[in-house]
Image (cartoon, rainbow, N blue to C red):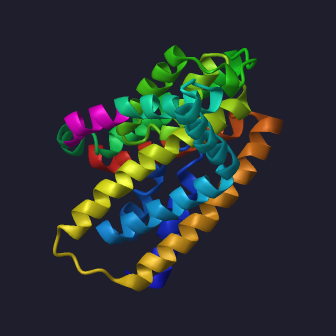
Amino acid sequence: MDWIQASIIALIQGITEFLPISSSAHLLFPSLLLGWPDQGLTFDVAVHLGSLLAVVIYLRKDLIRMVEGLCQWQQQKRLNQQATLALMLIVATLPAVFFGLVLKDWIEVNARALWVVAVTTLAFGLLLGWADWRSRRQHQIAAMSWRHTLCIGLAQALALLPGTSRSGITMTAALMLGYTREAAARFSFLMSIPIILAASSLMTLELVTSAVAVVWAPMLIGLVVSFASAWLCIVLFMQVISRMGMWPFVVYRMVLGVGLCWLILPTLS
């Protein structure tokens, strides 16, 4: 992989990781349109770490408050709001981890087809639009309950299907439960931290135990580009949804889904 390929793939990963438009759908295009080979495990680790670093820095104040809340809980033996939020994030991550371990092999064999990505891109894009239109948008994260946490966590597990979009489906669920757009997005970003950390840890373990040679230049490019693009996307996304809602991304998903269907047509003839 040369530096141009590394930069473009890392840019795609960084831009699409936190937007409700599906990173898996977009990462198909380099191989489908340009014939590029799979970027490999080492590069996957680098771009995921870049995305993780971006969201951690953006949400650093929230994370510091949660750490302080957990420390206070330990000292005072009384559960507080920030410690509760931290525990909720763990609970919200469990369904995706469980179903990911159980269904990983089945998904690899049966759910990676282009038509699956096209269908999920369209279907869950429309669901996001419906949720944004119908949502009461009155709750903040402080109103998050354990029932809502579990519902959003179960929704996150659906993102195991390529094309669904982890951020898209969790924001959809939060909107359907009556949370504001900003609260839905912020909780989705918080939920991304343990799930990306878990995925990166598994990939790192696989990398360490394999005989794959590490090529450092593409990894460094991937890390830097994915970090910068992911951080910028988070900042701009929060500004866009406060003014325009989710509909720009719904429309984009419709265009993307139609484009994927167009790519499928030659294989049906």
The magenta stretch spans which residues?
96-104
Which residue in the rendered view is the most extreme toward the right? 243
Image point (42%, 76%), residue name: 219
Whether residue 183 is visible to the viewer of this picture, yes or no, is yes
For the residue pair 149 and 229, the one nearer the viewer reads as: 149
Is residue 7 part of the magenta span, yes or no? Answer: no
- Looking at the rendering, in which quadrant would you find the C terminus? top left
For the residue pair 168 and 89, the one nearer the viewer reads as: 89
* The quarter of the displayed image where residue 71 is located: top right
For the residue pair 212 and 27, the one nearer the viewer reads as: 212
Whether residue 40 is visible to the viewer of this picture, yes or no, is no
For the residue pair 40 and 66, the one nearer the viewer reads as: 66
Q: How many marks overall?
A: 0
Image point (31%, 63%), residue name: 204
Q: From the top left corner, tell me how far across and down residue 99 is, in percent.
A: 28, 32
| 188 relative position to 215: left or right | right
Q: From the top left corner, tell me how far across and down residue 126 is, in percent.
A: 56, 27
Question: Where is 52 relative to 42, above or below?
Answer: above
| 10 relative position to 135: left or right | left
* The quarter of the displayed image where residue 62 is located: top right
Question: Where is 31 relative to 197, above or below?
Answer: below
User: Magenta-highlighted stretch: main secondary structure?
Assistant: helix
Q: From the top left corner, tell me how far across and down residue 43 is, in percent.
A: 38, 70
Is residue 99 part of the magenta span, yes or no? Answer: yes
- Looking at the rendering, in which quadrant would you find the N terminus? bottom left
Image point (73%, 52%), residue name: 235
Image point (45%, 37%), residue name: 164
